[in-house]
Image (cartoon, rainbow, N blue to C red):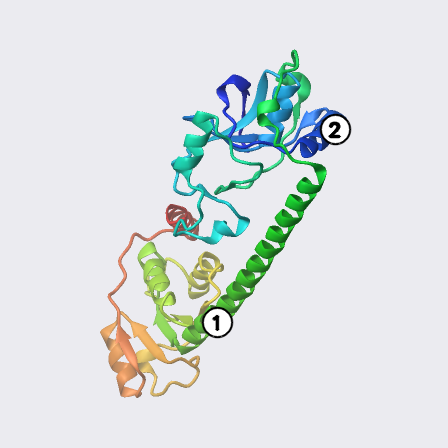
Amino acid sequence: MKYELVELERLIPLEEVFPNHLENIRQLIYRDGEIHKALIADRMTGTILDGSHRYAFLLEEGYKLAPVHWVNYQDENIRVGSKLAHRFLTDGCSFVNKSECIRRSSTGELFSPRTTRHFFPFRKNSITVSLADLKPGPKREIDHLLAKVNISEEISHNKSYLAEIDEELRILSDYIAEMVESRTYLTTQVDMLKASQPVIFFPGKFHPPHMGHVQTILQLASNCKKLIIGVTGDTPSNDIMTQNQIIQVLSDVLETFDNIEVLKINDTLTQKNDTCGLPKFDLLCSGNPDVIHWAEKQGVKAKFVERSLGVHCSGEVIRAVLSDSSSENI
């Protein structure tokens, strides 16, 4: 948590404090010689939203500075209520609101101790600030901050606060259970949707591999349960790469995609009279009209995809471009 060491004169209290609780805090702070929680205050008005008892300690003991985490109180993500459970309410049904808090702090008409519950969009993490860094000085009078209550009343108030905490824990427990149930339901839906997608067979020479191939492959892979890339052996006579080299490049480039498999196809598809020796699939995709025509003759469901265009390049270049593209989409 970011904080600044701020002069106490810039801060304005919002609530009174419990005298016995203040004494307990005094003992703990002097035992450690440190402050472990920053005060939280509105930057515009200086109103203390969290840390009234720490403020009272620093004021009474004569310290000139306090560790403060400034916030913009008008931020809609900062909310206020009179009970812990009000953190879950958005209709403003609690009697405490921000305008009343600012009015009270500016007029000195302080709330009773722990009347307000402020809820922030961040965790109030621990800090370590030595008391020596807060510039100790002469003690001050803080009678105007002390609530007129006895120990029994403080104990009763703390018990009520504990009951609120128990209620909030119950609400959170119910919410967690609801989210676990929703997660299980959505996971099942995703699995069912994935299972309903086809297994696509995408044969071709891929000679030599280029980014156009990779882009087409990734587009097909995003719409299927599994994509089988069949690298055929009918490479051109002026072969730049062998069939095995093509398979190696594609396998290396696509190794992080779980639903893509690269296979070696020994035959030229258009010269085959059947589908024997081919992997099991639901849909054949190709940019070669002759392959589509062959598939239709075999009674295989087929779909034409535009021929992929791109600059011939090595596997290293393809991986570099693919990595850059992934980084841009993060």
Q: State the image coordinates of residue 190 (x, y, percent, origin top left).
A: 44, 70
At label 2, counting other C-alpha atoms closer than 10 Å, the crowd grade (few under 14, some 14-19, many 20 or more) is: few
Residue shown at 36% from the left, 72% from the top = 203
- Camera-side residue of 62 and 129: 62
- For the image, the number of numbered tags is 2
Q: State the image coordinates of residue 110 (x, y, percent, origin top left).
A: 51, 31
Looking at the image, residue 225 lies above or below residue 83: below
- Camera-side residue of 309 and 303: 303
List the residue tagged with mark 2. 27
Q: State the image coordinates of residue 35 (x, y, percent, origin top left).
A: 66, 27
Label 2 sits on what residue type?
Gln
List the residue tagged with mark 1. 185
- Distance from disc 2 to disc 1, alpha carbons, whole Å, reads 51 Å
Looking at the image, residue 281 lies above or below residue 182: below
Q: State the image coordinates of residue 285 (x, y, percent, origin top left).
A: 31, 73
The residue most toward the top is: 138
- For marks 2 and 1, give the one nearer the viewer: 2
